[in-house]
Amino acid sequence: MKDNVRFFLWTSGNLAKPENKLGNLVSIGEVGGEAESIDTTTLESMAKESEVGFTDNGTVELVQNLTTNEYDKMKTLLDDGTVFNFGISVWSRKTKAQAMGLQ
Protein backbone atom coordinates (compact mmCIF):
# COMPACT_ATOMS: atom_id res chain seq x y z
CA MET A 1 0.00 0.00 0.00
CA LYS A 2 3.05 2.24 0.31
CA ASP A 3 3.07 5.29 -1.96
CA ASN A 4 -0.57 4.99 -3.10
CA VAL A 5 -1.39 8.46 -1.73
CA ARG A 6 1.10 11.06 -2.92
CA PHE A 7 1.65 14.68 -1.94
CA PHE A 8 3.09 16.89 -4.68
CA LEU A 9 4.63 20.34 -4.38
CA TRP A 10 5.67 22.40 -7.39
CA THR A 11 6.37 26.03 -8.20
CA SER A 12 3.78 28.16 -9.95
CA GLY A 13 3.92 27.95 -13.73
CA ASN A 14 5.21 24.37 -13.74
CA LEU A 15 3.31 21.10 -13.91
CA ALA A 16 3.08 18.42 -11.23
CA LYS A 17 5.31 15.48 -12.13
CA PRO A 18 6.11 12.23 -10.30
CA GLU A 19 9.53 13.63 -9.36
CA ASN A 20 7.73 16.47 -7.49
CA LYS A 21 6.44 13.95 -4.93
CA LEU A 22 7.30 15.17 -1.47
CA GLY A 23 7.33 13.03 1.65
CA ASN A 24 4.98 10.24 2.61
CA LEU A 25 1.53 11.21 3.83
CA VAL A 26 0.57 9.80 7.20
CA SER A 27 -2.92 11.32 7.47
CA ILE A 28 -5.26 13.85 5.88
CA GLY A 29 -7.56 15.87 8.14
CA GLU A 30 -11.23 16.54 7.59
CA VAL A 31 -12.04 18.50 4.43
CA GLY A 32 -15.09 20.70 4.10
CA GLY A 33 -16.77 23.74 5.44
CA GLU A 34 -20.08 25.43 5.79
CA ALA A 35 -21.69 28.68 4.77
CA GLU A 36 -22.25 31.37 7.35
CA SER A 37 -25.84 32.38 8.08
CA ILE A 38 -26.23 36.18 7.91
CA ASP A 39 -29.02 37.77 9.95
CA THR A 40 -31.02 40.04 7.60
CA THR A 41 -33.85 40.79 10.01
CA THR A 42 -35.07 44.40 9.90
CA LEU A 43 -37.66 46.33 11.90
CA GLU A 44 -40.11 45.64 9.06
CA SER A 45 -39.62 41.85 9.28
CA MET A 46 -42.54 39.75 10.54
CA ALA A 47 -40.11 37.06 11.77
CA LYS A 48 -36.38 36.48 11.95
CA GLU A 49 -34.80 36.42 8.46
CA SER A 50 -31.42 35.20 7.26
CA GLU A 51 -29.44 34.63 4.08
CA VAL A 52 -26.72 32.12 3.34
CA GLY A 53 -23.28 33.72 3.08
CA PHE A 54 -20.12 32.51 1.35
CA THR A 55 -18.87 29.02 2.10
CA ASP A 56 -15.74 28.92 4.25
CA ASN A 57 -13.86 25.74 3.36
CA GLY A 58 -11.47 26.29 6.24
CA THR A 59 -8.19 24.45 6.30
CA VAL A 60 -7.02 20.90 5.91
CA GLU A 61 -4.22 19.36 7.93
CA LEU A 62 -1.71 17.09 6.21
CA VAL A 63 0.65 15.00 8.32
CA GLN A 64 3.62 13.61 6.46
CA ASN A 65 7.05 12.15 6.99
CA LEU A 66 9.86 14.03 5.24
CA THR A 67 13.49 13.28 4.61
CA THR A 68 16.00 16.01 5.49
CA ASN A 69 16.32 16.92 1.78
CA GLU A 70 12.54 17.20 1.36
CA TYR A 71 12.25 19.38 4.47
CA ASP A 72 15.08 21.63 3.20
CA LYS A 73 13.29 21.96 -0.17
CA MET A 74 10.04 23.08 1.50
CA LYS A 75 11.84 25.45 3.87
CA THR A 76 13.76 27.07 0.99
CA LEU A 77 10.52 27.69 -0.92
CA LEU A 78 8.90 29.25 2.15
CA ASP A 79 11.94 31.35 3.08
CA ASP A 80 12.27 32.66 -0.50
CA GLY A 81 8.58 33.59 -0.63
CA THR A 82 8.16 31.29 -3.62
CA VAL A 83 4.56 30.79 -4.72
CA PHE A 84 3.94 27.08 -4.91
CA ASN A 85 1.07 24.73 -5.63
CA PHE A 86 0.26 21.46 -3.96
CA GLY A 87 -1.77 18.44 -4.89
CA ILE A 88 -2.72 15.09 -3.49
CA SER A 89 -3.25 12.09 -5.73
CA VAL A 90 -4.57 8.63 -4.97
CA TRP A 91 -3.17 5.85 -7.14
CA SER A 92 -4.86 2.55 -7.94
CA ARG A 93 -2.76 -0.44 -6.92
CA LYS A 94 -4.56 -2.51 -9.56
CA THR A 95 -4.08 -0.26 -12.61
CA LYS A 96 -0.98 1.61 -11.35
CA ALA A 97 -2.63 4.85 -12.52
CA GLN A 98 -3.99 7.88 -10.73
CA ALA A 99 -7.53 7.16 -9.54
CA MET A 100 -8.34 10.63 -8.22
CA GLY A 101 -6.59 13.84 -7.30
CA LEU A 102 -6.92 17.20 -5.57
CA GLN A 103 -5.05 20.28 -6.66
Image: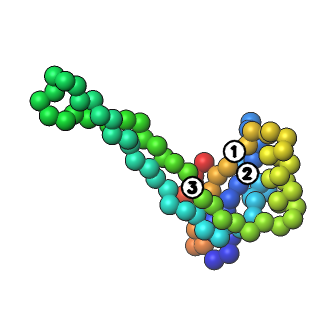
Residue 34, compared with residue 27, is above or below; it is above
Residue under label 2: 9
Q: Amino acid at mark 2?
A: Leu
Q: How is the image coloured?
A: rainbow
Q: Quadrant of residue 79?
A: top right
Residue 48, compared with residue 30, is above or below; it is above
Tell me residue 91's x, y (percent). 61, 65
Tell me residue 92's x, y (percent). 58, 68
Residue 60, numbered label: 3
Is residue 72 toward the left or the right of residue 61 in the image? right
Q: Are marks 2 and 1 in contact (CB under 8 Å)?
A: yes
The residue sitting at 58% across, 73% down in the picture is 94
Q: Could you say which is closer to the camera, residue 30 or residue 16? A: 30
Residue 85, numbered label: 1
At mark 2, the secondary structure is strand
Q: Amino acid at mark 1?
A: Asn
The numbered mark, 3 or 2, whose residue comes first in the sequence reads 2
The residue sitting at 60% across, 48% down in the picture is 103
